[in-house]
Amino acid sequence: MSPGSGPLANNNYPKKTKMMERADSKPQTAEEALPVLEVENLCVQFKSDSGVTTAVVDESFVIRPGETLALVGESGSGKSVTSLSVMRLVEHGGGRIVRGSIKLRCRDGRVVDLTKANRTELQKLRGSEVAMIFQEPMTSLNPVFTVGAQIAESLTLHRGMNEQEAAAEAVRLLKLVRIPDAERVALRFPHQLSGGMRQRVMIAIALACKPQLLIADEPTTALDVTVQAQILALIAKLQKDIGMAVLFITHDMGVVAQIADRVAVMRYGEIVEHGDAKTIFAHPTHPYTQALLSAVPRLGALKDVPHPCFFRLIDPDNGQVIEPPSDKLPAPGDTVLEVNDIVKTFPVRTDFWGNPTHVVRACDHVSFRLRKGETLSIVGESGCGKSTTGRAVLRLLDVDSGDIIYRDRSLVNMTRRDLQVQRRHLQMIFQDPYASLDPRQTVGYSIAEPLMIHNICSKKEMWDRVAMLLKRVGLSPDMANRYPHEFSGGQRQRICIARALSLKPEVIIADECVAALDVSIRAQVVNLMMELQEEMGLSYIFISHDMGVVERISHRVAVMYLGQIVEMGPRQKVLTNPLHPYTQKLLSAVPIADPNERNLLKLLNLSDLPSPVRKVGDDPVIDPLVEVEPEHFVAKHEVGGMAGA
């Protein structure tokens, strides 16, 4: 493909590169600005025992100062491989750039072809000129160093700060990315933070040196909507202040609509459609782009529908509508799970004798019921206690007080052997798919392992079920012999979903189970979960920050704030008539999937989440939930200076 042909032919940029023009030229418009990054005819391949795989095919694009190019597409389409190629990290994963150039313009006007740069030059450029926010923060952060030390490292290397200056700047950066109690968080290790907080630490590291080019690979996947709004506003401010260019890789089309100047849609390693963001959203021409946009959940679309609804999807190959299996799920049945007044605290500071003096009250007198065939969604900001509640329900964490009753039996007072038997009926899909899969085992074995432990079926039936489950979550059965590192983040999450379904449980706790999935697969998995719910009477506790998906899948919604449930009720009532100020704040920050209605970057006045750390004995006042309308409960207390309903 020639540089002036193919999917980039209509991008309104000159066909000839300007990268070698003088650095002191002064363009009058954004169209004339010298590109910060120019990728031409990039081809990346991976070698394996099964042969050579071409992950990126003849890819070309440019990004100019202050511009945001959103790279979207399905999991495994080549988005992350593109970003790793620009950083020249793809070689560490077994990839090889076989053709093309990647030219980066530095602050001093030098133009560096990254495909030809040596190791020393790359070390100087990474962090200072080009920085990256990685998709999985737990695997990107060093587990043996505090997060403050990891931020300070880049400051000392690239900005010449001494130890004290770097430590102070690290705390300031943590505050910039909306982390409460930043001074104490800087002294913690990655495993002591929630997934959302770890992602914010990664963003702080990437922004520390104010790079010329920021590559953001799913940077807001693990973040709740309010923090997401603040982070996107922070990136936009840096773009304005220093002219930073951004390559934004995401599957969240709502975020794309809010921040992107241009959109490039990838499929099977190629850019199949490219253009102005408003044009792409208003008039998508490629069937695959149409399929992506059909799977975007739009908050408010079901305001007149009281029950969960399947997505109506479009076939990416022919553009035809795929009709859902049904229009309405059956009504929920009797109560199967009761959570009664559970409390869970984590010590964060101790005295000389090892007694805790300060604790985080992750669950503070949380109570709810779950009925057969019902989906209860728990929403709230990162660190509010959603994941802790889910883990406590499965007895993966021991609660301080309260009770959890499943089928009239207390899980809190159950023996270890009895609990193992009950866990056949209670399964969990974890937030971080890479950390929850054994890297030494094939994914087929990981899916089959629960069947082996509980001795459910014969060996042949077991592997037949593994193949069936892989197909049900959109993967090929022949992938069963691969290892977790051979899959993208979204594909790994689908494997975790298949594993949770292997025992045909009655209750599934899904902790951000679709956060890592691209929009089309996410819609398919949500449809699959509802289809299984209809067939098997499954009950879900759906923990999420994606309010559009919550609206699609939920019967009821519970809103958590600082470990407490502040509003709970039928989904239609909570989302269309939010009565608690915190619920109203959450819903106001949801990105609108329309480039003509950009609301995220105006939300700079959102109040910060107060520190969840409290002195031992300084228990917060827990006001009971008050029924303000049938089945709609709201807490009446002060929340961050806002009076409750």
Image (cartoon, rainbow, N blue to C red):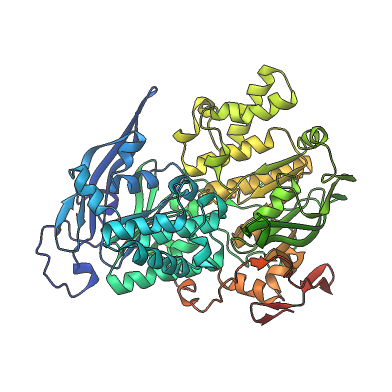
Question: Which part of the image, by quadrant, shows the N terminus?
Answer: top left
Q: Position of residue 553 (x, y in %)?
A: 68, 55
Residue sitting nearer the eye, 562 or 580: 562
In front here: 592 or 633?
633
Residue at 63% of width from left, 22% of height from top? 463
Rendered position, 54 above or below 576: above
Residue drawn at (52%, 40%) of the image: 434
Number of numbered discs on residues: 0
Picture residue at 67% right of the left edge, 23% below the top: 462
Left of 126 or right of it: where is 472? right
Give percent across and percent down for residue 281.
44, 62
Between 236 and 64, the residue placed more toward the observer is 236
Quarter that holds the C terminus = bottom right
Residue 185 in view, yes or no: yes
Residue at 71% in and 65% down? 616
Furthest residue to the left? 22
Q: Using the rendered view, name the quadrant where residue 68 is placed.
A: bottom left
Figure check: 182 above or below 71 = below
Q: Is residue 284 visible?
A: no
Say whether residue 450 is left or right of residue 76.
right
Which of the 4 image quadrants contains residue 588? bottom right
300 relative to 636, above or below: above
